[in-house]
Image (cartoon, grey):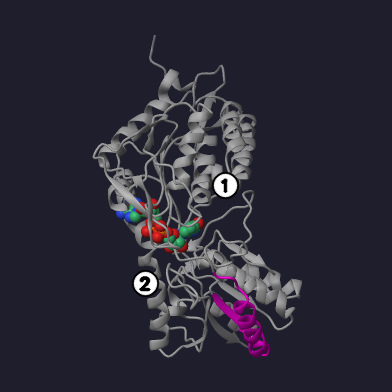
Amino acid sequence: MAIPIPSRQLFINGDWAEPLLKKRIPIINPTTEEIIGDIPAATAEDVDVAVQAARSALTRNKGKDWAFASGAVRAKYLRAIAAKDDVIGCFEYYADLAEGLDAKQKAPISLPMKTFKSYVIREPIGVVALIVPWNYPLLMATWKVAPALAAGCAAILKPSELASVTCLELGEVCREVDLPAGVLNILPGLGPEAGASLASHPHVDKISFTGSTVTAVKIMTAAAQRVKPVTLELGGKGPIVVFEDVDIDKAVEWTIFGCFYTNGQICSATSRLIVHESIAAEFLDRLVKWSENIKISDPLEEGCKLGPIVSSGQYEKVMNFISNAKGEGATILYGGNRPKHLKKGFFVEPTIITDVTTSMQIWREEVFGPVLCVKTFTTEEEAIELANDTHYGLGGAVVSKDRERCDRVSKLLQNGAVWVNCSQPCFCQAPFGGTKWSGFGRELGEWGLESYLSVKQVTEYVSDEQWGWYQPPKQ
Ligand code: NAD
């Protein structure tokens, strides 16, 4: 079934605008490998126009239209967007927080001296650049757009060149709800062109980035030149630790969900299975049987549970990881190939790799595909050591019927999110983010809002007395 792809331009200052250099990027359907449309590609020239639009949006009508409007005013727009959009929950949640912000303004600070009074106001950081990846494109964008707008920032969203279509549709929604012009601008384009220009732009006040660790280093370097704050949500190589007391089928399902859901293209995927040796043989046997049952097809087909990898480049990367693992002496227990029934498209079978050592690439590096590697353990200490044996620290999971053990392990896992007896569920009320190479700062929840706010103290001298530090001049 052909899906009509709307032909869009860049979204700048409340309206569609052709890229100044008229560049466009083709959209390739990863299922059919055919070109099905194209997207506009912003360059440094368009970034300048969009940043100017965002700055004006902040200061228009002395800021009363947006940055200094009450949170309740901004909440109305967020709710109007939610009413038309697919990522409703997140917009509605931040509409609530925008309203809550009004009550928190001018919160008094208790001081040790009665001669002073102090309060705190929370202000939008300013113009923010929101750079997002291709997996969950509209959701990753919403995790940034909703809190940024709730805070009163003006934003420039840079979707991935591999998945911009849904983000561009958000532009149409903004037009329909009459969001003040320039508050949200949407600039698809190539990373080194649109992305890099945004990251280094002198009038962008903050960068919130989700993507690979390699790109994060470039963004941080650009931001450092202007002492610009960054929030970084990066890659992962998450562990799922399975103890001997589990219900095997339940644990197996969470294990495959944790690694094969959306084809393993999840930053928080728990792609390293660490299973107790006493149940390993039976567990792996069931894991293979459940994996055989996964329907691999065009994602538009009813019942599809595993679709194609996003692009040919990413497909090649995943296949290279599998062949390197073989080359290094690991065993491909299941999968590892293109599914036989699919001749076209960037499909990879769900893949389970055993006989893995901790020095192998497959243990150390993020694959971002449906590839699970397995190690066994005997003691809890050994399990924790293996789980933390990674530069990354995004999501981790522990599966056991022993509550106390789950609490102990949760504390010791070096991850920003720990799932107990599950893997991956994510709620917009709870903070999300990583440690180590997985980045810093938190999205979602009240932490997501804080990252777009600047805190200002206002301190007043309230005594009738002279301050008295200097000698008064003789009359
Ligand atoms: P990527 O780093 O290649 O690209 C991410 C975004 O950065 C894209 O919009 C891209 O155009 C842009 N970009 C590329 N080069 C740039 C540059 N020099 N300056 C500025 N912007 C630039 O990542 P990707 O391949 O799109 O996404 C996959 C990665 O994202 C994985 O590593 C994954 O783990 C990570 N990810 C993390 C999270 C999280 O919340 N932690 C969520 C999803 C994805």
In this picture, which residue range is highlighted in magenta?
272-296
* Depth order, front residue of 424/308: 308
- Residue at horizontal 48%, vertical 57%? 135
Q: Amino acid at mark 2?
A: Glu
Quadrant hosting ligand 1: bottom left
Pointer 1 or 2: first along the chain: 2
Depth check, mark 1 against mark 2: the one in front is 2
* Depth order, front residue of 60/368: 368
CA neighbours of label 2 inside 10 A, class few (<14), some (14 to 19), many (20+): some
- Residue 70: image x %, image y %? 57, 25
For label 2, the residue is: 316
- Residue at horizontal 61%, vertical 29%? 102
Q: Residue furthest top?
A: 475
Judged left or right of residue 413, residue 221 is left
Q: Are marks 1 and 2 in contact (CB under 8 Å)?
A: no
How far, Cα to Cα, is label 1 from label 2? 37 Å
- Residue 117: image x %, image y %? 58, 27
